[in-house]
Image (cartoon, helix red, strand yellow):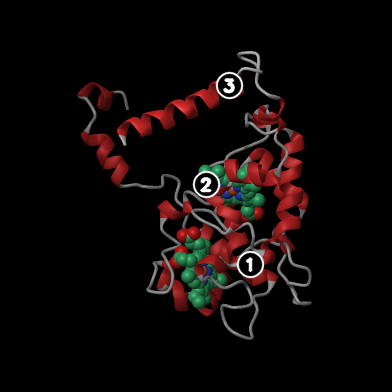
Amino acid sequence: MIVFRHLCVLVALAAILASGCGMPHGQPSKDSEVLAPSEVLEFGTLYAENCAGCHGAEGRGGAAIALNNPVYLAIADDAAIRKVILKGVPGTAMPAFGQSAGGMLTDAQVKVITKEIRSHWSKQGILDAATVPSYAPKSIGDAQRGEVAYKTFCESCHGPGGAGASKGSAITNDSFLALVSDQGLRTIIITGRPELGAPDWRGNVPGRPMSDQEVTDVLAWLASHRVSNPGQPYSASNYTQHQEPQDVRRK
Ligand code: HEC
Ligand code: HEC
């Protein structure tokens, strides 16, 4: 039995050696050529390697919003999406991918991603003739009116003051707000996060879609909870504790 197995191994080895004989050493065969990263133009590969880690496989969402949300694709045009991919969103986890902004993707690659996000995941007629708030704000928000709108549209899930409740997480605490841009918040208020059960602007109160102004005002109210030093007082007290005396004197 053992001898027989050795024989099999030898035959297999011989087959491998024989098949390799026709090829000059060190030269890859034609079909094994690998593209340089900047030459990859296939959407699936580009998306999986650069975006899926945060936006989820197949755009289904993860730490960051789902990009396969057809409502999102109906309100955000290619120019807006392309700009975010090229330049990122400063102050958030969204990196700049354009080479011009220090990223790794060529303009051609960013174009493919932008175009194919839409061709893969948008749905014609998804807005159903509804009046949809605009992607970018059209007016100035009013935080006081926003607080009223919050109570009407959001409090049932996110709790009094946005502090979080059983149906929705805390959205006014400074560490959450520190990691998200105003546009990022506006996007979520309009499009919801269907992958997590968060309703879009039509679904907070059934039969009562939010107006553009209400979206803008709620955002102003949320943003009014931003603080200049997020994470305080914890980081401040740590900082003081670990200071050497001469550092304290430098103040
Ligand atoms: C490290 C995590 C991370 C990676 C990787 C990442 N994103 Fe993002 N992305 C985010 C976050 C976080 C936001 C929300 C930023 C904000 O607050 O506005 C975002 C926002 C976006 C938006 C804008 C949403 C809006 O409000 O209009 C688009 C479009 C987007 N990402 C596309 C991509 C694409 C395409 C890729 C891959 C080329 C990618 N992202 C890779 C984290 C990531
Ligand atoms: C029917 C319940 C419900 C209503 C109403 C609702 N939300 Fe949400 N919301 C959710 C759920 C569920 C999530 C996703 C999970 C989580 O973060 O709690 C979410 C997520 C969010 C997030 C992202 C939080 C994060 O951690 O990424 C924001 C911001 C948000 N909602 C704001 C609002 C605002 C503003 C309103 C009112 C205009 C609103 N929501 C109304 C249920 C709701």
Residue 189 is at least partly visible in this image: yes
Q: Where does residue 119 sit, x and y in percent of width and height?
A: 76, 56
Is the distance from the Cβ of mark 2 to the nearest ligand 1 atom less than 8 Å? yes
Find the distance from the CA under tag 1 to the CA under tag 3: 64 Å
| Quarter-of-image position of residue 71 | bottom right
Is the distance from the Cβ of mark 3 to the nearest ligand 1 atom less than 8 Å? no
Callout 1 amino acid? Ile
Pick the front one: 70 or 151: 70
Q: Residue at x 65, y 21 (%)?
A: 28
Task: For label 3, count other residues whose C-alpha is less than 10 Å away and answer few (under 14), some (14-19) or many (20+).
Answer: few
Find the distance from the CA under tag 3 to the CA under tag 2: 43 Å
In the image, farthest residue toward the top: 25
Q: Residue at x 66, y 31 (%)?
A: 101
If you read the primary sequence from the N terminus, does the residue marked by circle 3 or circle 2 appear first? 3
Callout 3 amino acid? Ala
Q: Kindly identify which residue carries mark 3.
A: 18
Element class at badge 3:
helix
Mark 1 or mark 2, whichever is nearer to me: 2
Q: Kindly identify which residue carries mark 2.
A: 53
| Quarter-of-image position of residue 45 | top right
